[in-house]
Amino acid sequence: MISTSGPRRPRRPQPTRLLVALAATVGLLAPAVPATAAVGEPVTYLGHTYSSTVTRPSADKPQSKLWYLDGTWWALMVGAGGSQVYIHELLPDHTWRNTGALVDSRANSTGDALWSARDSKLYVASRVSGANLQVAAFTYTPASRSWAMAQSFPVTVNSGGGSESASIDQDSLGRLWVTYTRGSKVWVAHSDPAGGGWTAGFLPAVVDTSIKADDLSAIIAFGSSVGVMYSDQVSGKFWFAIHDDADPDDVWRLEDATATLSSVDDHINLKQLVGDPQGRIYAAVKTAANGVTGAPASAPLVGVLSRTGPSDGQGTWQFATAGTIADDHTRPIIMIDSTNQELYFFATSPGNGGDIVHKKSSLSAVSFPAGRGAPFVDAKPVVNNASGAKDPVTAETGLVVLAVAEGQKRYVHAEMDLGGGDGGGGGGGDVAPPTVGTSPSAGATEVAVGTSAVATFSEVVQGVTTSTFTLTTDGGSPVPAALTSDASGTAWTLDPASDLAAGAVYTVTLTGGPDAIRDLAGNALETESSSFTTATAAEPPGDSVEPTVTAKTPAPGATRFSRTGNVTVTFSEPVQDVTTETFVLRNSATGAVVTAVVKRSMDTNKYVLNPSATLPARTSFTATVVGGASGVADLAGNRLAADVGWSFTTRA
């Protein structure tokens, strides 16, 4: 039943001491007999029904309908008996309360929810089959547990019409990005940092964006980049297109994420452990093995692709089977338990409708047990289209998965206590919040303009991003910077893209919270801010120092370089005259020049050479930066002393 009482502050839903029984008349769960659910045992609850005109409201595969905030779970759901999508709150009695906040009035819209701790806003990207994308933003009022549409929203994104799916994320500069597929192509669009002004949809600048009409894409922001994974049933690949936040819109690189798979299907669900020192990304995917004539029943049908590697470098992809043709899974999603460092896999099985089943694996070495898996959302006659949350779950949040009971036109969800922390069932555990020290220290003066901000935590933390660890000017403007951590995950460095201004005040802010910086048990850091002042500039002497090359990618002598990768060079100071004549890539054997575009990476000293076509496999190339009288010069006219060249070899 749906609660008709006014807003009230609930405790976290706990699947313990529940009243559960089988209602034989409709074959569905209903309260009847007391039962006790232990840690790791999911319990299913029926939700409200919706209009018969609504189809698959908990879809689509790349999207997340749930988020956790202020001690409870929230969801994008069609209102009881209706056809429009509203924000709903999960109450302690396991029912959903319609908050009255309308998300999208269009029939059969499906949305992807993103809670931004950086902006304290909920963003929702909604799509329908016959109209442009829509992005809504909501603010939350804790006292009334209510949501309101933010000023200047919703915004219509020019997607050229209806799309196959849509998902949303936010980059390190605060811009919102959406991806969708339409007209057998993969598209992206992004906002300005305020979220109001948007580009029209455009194709990522990679060599292969042509796909089948039913292929789809998903987006994830990681480190200082955004990544778009898309299925390509034409070439039989899962591609991962990466755009560094500081680069122009037309600078991308492409990774082949297919790993050992021999076929692909249009099923993708992307997740990450935010602030993970290893930079890991996980994708639940489905293959097309069940459509291959003669394929054995043991052939992988669904599983998880895992990426390791930095956001600004080449990643490595591996595949772990979660189900075979015989297991007959479909529409897989994943969720990350950061408290226990585990990865949960969910899917519908059998594929024509059944239960939402689940398996789990350690994050450190992804591997799933054989078999179909145990039921997670279990209602009759069939359940389909599982949806979860973008952010990792913890012992505090528990685990909630939303789905629909098809044929009944009814929502159904399951809750499970994770244990392992202070979230119930864990037997106590870590309840102490992390602490942090910063450098430069609060109130420091005469700080070098080339300094970096360093945060050293008392324990390993998660949720450290360029949204939760920021450096701002005295006027509040963010300073573009790269974020890195040491191997232990306790020391994090924010390295500005260029020197700070002399004699200026800067503020370091570390934002704590359940969706921001917290330890692995979910205990939130207390938000801290501190300011320092840089040293006053000395009178500069006349510039007679020649520029130098300080960094190159790929590294000299590198092998297995991505055939779709970009070549970059970074100088010791701002320079001029970097063109296709002075930054050149050649075939080492033939000397043939590779046609490419050369651009500066935003306002940094890095320049990017983006080849116009995929490089041939197992081929040696030589990159050259021209020095001397006709070469690269700094802004004072000092030339690079001599040519700088290095060679590398592409992968197979």
Image (cartoon, rainbow, N blue to C red):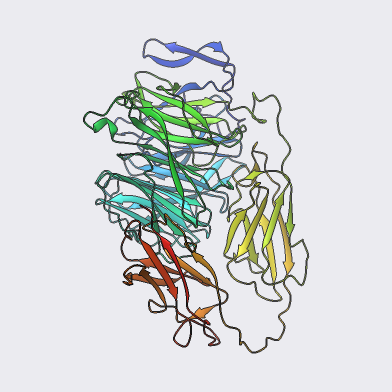
Which one is in front, 325 or 77? 325
**In the drawing, does residue 439 fall left or right of residue 136?**
right
**In the drawing, does residue 223 fall left or right of residue 523?**
left
List the single residue furthest toward the front.
589
List the single residue furthest toward the bottom.
542
Residue 79 in sight: no
Looking at the picture, how far across and down is residue 144, in whole percent?
A: 59, 41
In the rendered view, would you say 475 is above or below 619?
Answer: below
Residue 166 in sight: yes
Task: Give the total of numbered labels.
Answer: 0
In the rendered view, would you say 140 is above or below 559?
Answer: above
Looking at the picture, how far across and down is residue 324, in whole percent?
A: 35, 27
Which one is in front, 499 or 122? 499
Which one is in front, 445 or 129? 445
**In the drawing, does residue 432 fall left or right of residue 480?**
right
List the single residue furthest toward the left.
293
Looking at the picture, how far across and down is residue 149, in whole percent?
A: 48, 50
Residue at 55 percent across and 29 percent down: it is 91
Looking at the picture, how far across and down is residue 536, in whole percent?
A: 73, 78
